[in-house]
Amino acid sequence: MSVKILGKSKGFYDTFERRPGINKEQTHYCPGCGHGILHKLIAEAVVDFGVAENLIFISPVGCSVFSFYYFNAGNFQAAHGRAPAVATGVKRAKPESIVISYQGDGDLAAIGGNEILHAANRGEAITVFFVNNAIYGMTGGQMAPTTLIGQKTTTTPYGRTLQNEGYPIRMAEIISSLESPVYVERVMLADTRSINAARKAVRKGIKNQIENKGFSFVEVLSTCPTGWKMTPPQSQEWIKSTLSETFPLGVYKDISDQVEPLDLSQNFAPSERIPKLIGLEQDKLDYDIATMKIAKEIDQEIRISGFGGQGVLTLGVWLSEIGMREDLNVSWIPSYGPEMRGGTANCHVKLSRTSIGSPLVTHPSILIAMNRPSLEKFEEDVIEGGAIIWDNSLIDIEPTRKDIKNIPVPATEIANELGNTRISNVVILGVLAGFSDFLDPLVVQRVLPLIFKKKHLLEINLKAFQKGLELGRELLA
Amino acid sequence: MAKARGLVAVNFEECKGCKLCVDACPVDVLHLAKSFNTHGYSPAEYDGEGCTGCGICYYACPEPGAITVFKRWEEAQEAYICHNNNVQSRLSLQDSVRGLALCDSCGQEVILSDFLNLRFAE
């Protein structure tokens, strides 16, 4: 006979190492918060059903944004309100996984109202847990779409009124009115009996997904003692006496016994079809891949930074384009912002033989600095033995570090001599190809015509590249 | 009164003193401690006797690992596998209020609420 013990679920990490600060044992939730109870019910269910290994948790914006501190599972943190959209993508790409979209009422009913309606309407085979505490808890207790009439919040200090804010939205009722959802229930976390009912609903929602039944939606009336300015026992009492009056509990829809399991294998395009779909096969180069120089230094993390207009983002696009044609994994993300008006507009580029986990380049192996603020800002981030390529015709200081390769290039000057300031980024590309062995000049010269479709532009850019290439080779020698 | 055959162990450092378990306990054997833990909360404590092992406090508690309930303490006591010697040993209850026991095999203190690090024979 096995020993019966109720303790911390294996669905959680033993210690919460991802949580910043010294407190790695407690959750970040306030005392008495309903999130913790629901987390426990979910963790227990996925472990009991043996799917903890396959769990991908989509965390929202709200207090539960940090659920990846706690769940020993895969996690995506979605933009505000977009958890069901992200969950849709994850479930379609990995139909064998258990995808849980976990959202609060501000996230799901306000900002993400559209996403949840359409995910539900499409009948995505995911499980949605909707934590309804009638306010925006994380931001300090503002009115949410679910706030009760007369309820005082920081943004409705005299109480919510019909005239100004309208009626509270009942999401479970709305979702259950759609055709596709197979299971919609509203439960509460207010006492032993209701928590037990919530536990059953959580398990059913997850079970439905394991059996590929379709879209399951569990609304959970939950406490926010801090936002409601009550003690935890008082808040549970308030759910029972007040909140559940406006949001009646119960099963709003359950056709999970009547529906056939979905066939999820047709839900997404196989990866080999994608290049064809986006027309990549057409302009494949005709060179023989075996003749290409696959260099040892091919994995590069590059940060390119400068003024807006210098072509720093474009240079990043070219690098990833070239990398793609060398059959590498590539990533490129720009860093937009007020910096576009002078300062440090920059982009992150990764070229790798293995798959890329994160596209962020926090410690570049190569920094390309096209203006002074960029050099000052990113110099310290470069890894030891990395390289800094900087435009010494524009930057009047020098890198101070001695443990890096210092490569000054008068790129703007050269570009001006050639007749167009805007091609300084191509000069840099040439230098990069010349001094390092991860870019094959032959490949670059073959890719450039694909980028510059206009003939007259191609000529001057090839010239600039050649000039940079020569300079780079000189530097190497 | 229901038969006391369970044991509840509250993790002194993980509990935030929200009092939900104290209110939920049907046999009323939990209370808030007079002292504070390092995070400044007054955690819940077991009275030391009377737990039936129903598990209601476990589900009432919002912290993942603050409460551990041994449904049949005597069985769990015998099935304990020593962390150091990797043999089946026996737990002797040392402090039922704080949930501390001694392992008969290695003699070391066992925090009963540290559930993920405890092993028991099937």
Image (spheres, rainbow, N blue to C red):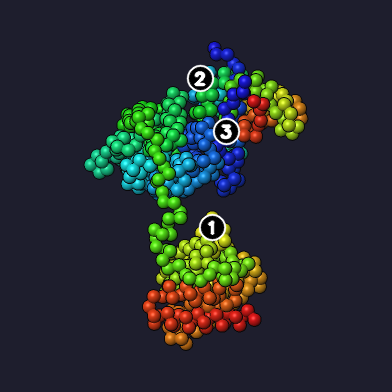
Horizontal side of residue A365 vs A162, given as left or right? right
**Disc 3 and disc 1: Cα gap in Å?**
34 Å
Nearer-the-camera pick, A420 or A454: A454
The residue beneath circle 1 is A356
Q: Are marks 2 and 3 on the same chain?
A: no
Q: Chain of mark 2?
A: B
Determine the secondary structure under disc 3. Answer: loop
Nearer-the-camera pick, A429 or A383: A429
The residue beneath circle 2 is B26
| Category of crowding for the residue at label 3, using alpha-carbon neighbours closer than 10 angstroms: few (below 14), some (14–19), many (at least 20) | many
> Which quarter of the picture shows residue B8?
top right
**Disc 2 and disc 3: Cα gap in Å?**
21 Å
The N terminus of chain A - image quarter: top right
Report whether residue A414 is seen.
Answer: yes
Q: x and y percent of residue A300 in the render?
A: 57, 65
Seen at 55% across and 80% down, the residue is A469
The residue beneath circle 3 is A8
Circles 3 and 1: CB distance less than 8 Å? no
Residue extending furthest toward the top: B1
Report whether residue B109 is seen.
Answer: no
The amino acid at mark 1 is: Ile
Horizontal side of residue A13 vs A272, given as left or right? right
Q: Chain of mark 1?
A: A
Determine the secondary structure under disc 2. Answer: loop
Is label 2 or label 1 in front? 1
Q: x and y percent of residue A366 in the render?
A: 57, 69
Horizontal side of residue A326 vs A153, given as left or right? right
The amino acid at mark 3 is: Lys
Seen at 66% across and 70% down, the residue is A403
